[in-house]
Amino acid sequence: MDLIIRRAMLPPSVAPQPGQPLDIGIEAGRIVAVEPHLAAAAREEIDAAGSLVTPPFVDPHFHMDATLSYGLPRVNASGTLLEGIALWGELKPQLTQDALIERAMQYCDWAVARGLLAIRSHVDVCDPRLLAVEALVEVKRRVAPYLDLQLVAFPQDGVLRSPGAFENLKRSIAMGVDVVGGIPHFERTMADGAQSVRMLCEYAAEQGLRVDMHCDESDDPMSRHIETLAAETQRLGLHGRVTGSHLTSMHSMDNYYVSKLLPLMRESGVAAIANPLINITLQGRSDTYPKRRGMTRVPEMMAAGINVAFGHDCAMDPWYSLGSGDMLEVAHMGLHVAQMTGVEGMHACFDAVTVNGARILGLEDYGVAPGCAANLVLLDARNPVEAIRLRAARLVVISRGKVVSRAPAARAALSLEGRPAEVDFKLHRG
Ligand code: FE2
């Protein structure tokens, strides 16, 4: 074999025998064995020594065309979603393909170092030059040997509201973009929003594509485009291929209405993506007090059988000045905002940045089982809860069977079991 990872603890959601350390055998970029004591030799062995080995983090919602552009051409003074969209509009005419590629490649480097090996990125298709589309298709090609990058054709200014946007969207699909996007709540009227959902879903059905719409990213409880999205999914037989991103208005919807909405979403197989860092930052922005948290109903959707994942959404761009590609930070924020502090809830938050996102992207060879792609992350943590608590170091990141990143351990000083290292005492005591 090429590589064996010994004594790995797997997250319960992917472990064939939870609680038991396992050896993982890797050959030619694939996992070929997962068993307690693998009687084989390999060219390289890594001893996990009981630490957590997980399939990689998945970010199902990101904007790679805007990333790392913080401060260009100015910062978002109000910090609102609408000023962010206006600021992005100011930046668009100044974008060059080289700069877009450079920033996206830098972000992909950060992602790999954090064990984030699959990203679904929206790409704005409203500029008829489609510079960002060309740039991200090129980035997708460059990172393909080590990172799954899926692109969504995203009409940021509204597919109906922005002249030529639907044609641009179709052109971008022909150029190699994978998924149909939309933004119904940004159209001029509720009726236009619903019409945009119908039109985009019909196009996706014709083309055999997946759909992922920014949907109801608003504090307005009457923003109910998710209902239309679920109904269209059912009508067109798109079950399992459609995702509603953000869905923040749901935090303020009438409870009776939601009791009808969630079963419709489950029956249509529509998945949901919350973006905790961004939702807690942008939503409820015009509230005084009480101030709404702004994230959609994550535990309630999970309990209703809807697949819910967490996305990073933004990193150092017109909407968000922080972020570093760390999906454990995303899970950490999601866990707090959704008050998912029970043991099951914390594990569900880990799944929301790993397996749940993989299902949304349709990553068929994702997981820790023979036949899966050998994409794995050894974390400096014993279990998913500790990984979230510490935003644990990614000790080793493996992509397609090759080690692509290593980082030093830090857990010993931060665990109940391990005493702080001597060096720390010396530092603190001067
Ligand atoms: Fe977004």
Image (cartoon, helix red, strand yellow):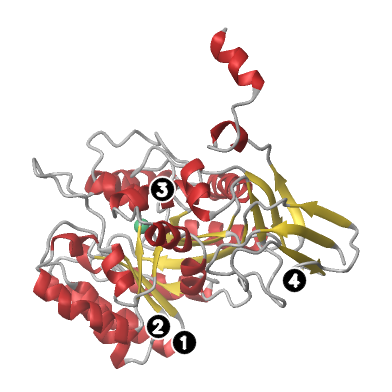
Front: mark 1 or 3: 3
Give residue 25's position: percent from left, percent from top: 79, 67
Mark 4 residue crowding within 10 angstroms, few (<14) / some (14–19) / many (20+) = some
The residue at which mark 2 appears reads as 204
Front: mark 2 or 3: 3
Distance from Cα at disc 1 to Cα at disc 4: 38 Å
6 above or below 210? Answer: above
- The kind of secondary structure element at disc 3 is helix
The residue at which mark 4 appears reads as 35
Front: mark 4 or 3: 4
407 above or below 358? Answer: above
- The kind of secondary structure element at disc 4 is strand
Label whose residue precedes the other's in the sequence (1 or 3): 1
Distance from Cα at disc 1 to Cα at disc 3: 35 Å
* 293 displayed left or right of 356: left
**Which amino acid, mark 1?**
Gly
Give residue 371's position: percent from left, percent from top: 71, 78
The residue at which mark 1 appears reads as 208
Distance from Cα at disc 2 to Cα at disc 1: 6 Å
Task: Point out the quarter of the image occupied by ligand 1.
Answer: bottom left
**Which amino acid, mark 3?**
His
**Which amino acid, mark 4?**
Glu
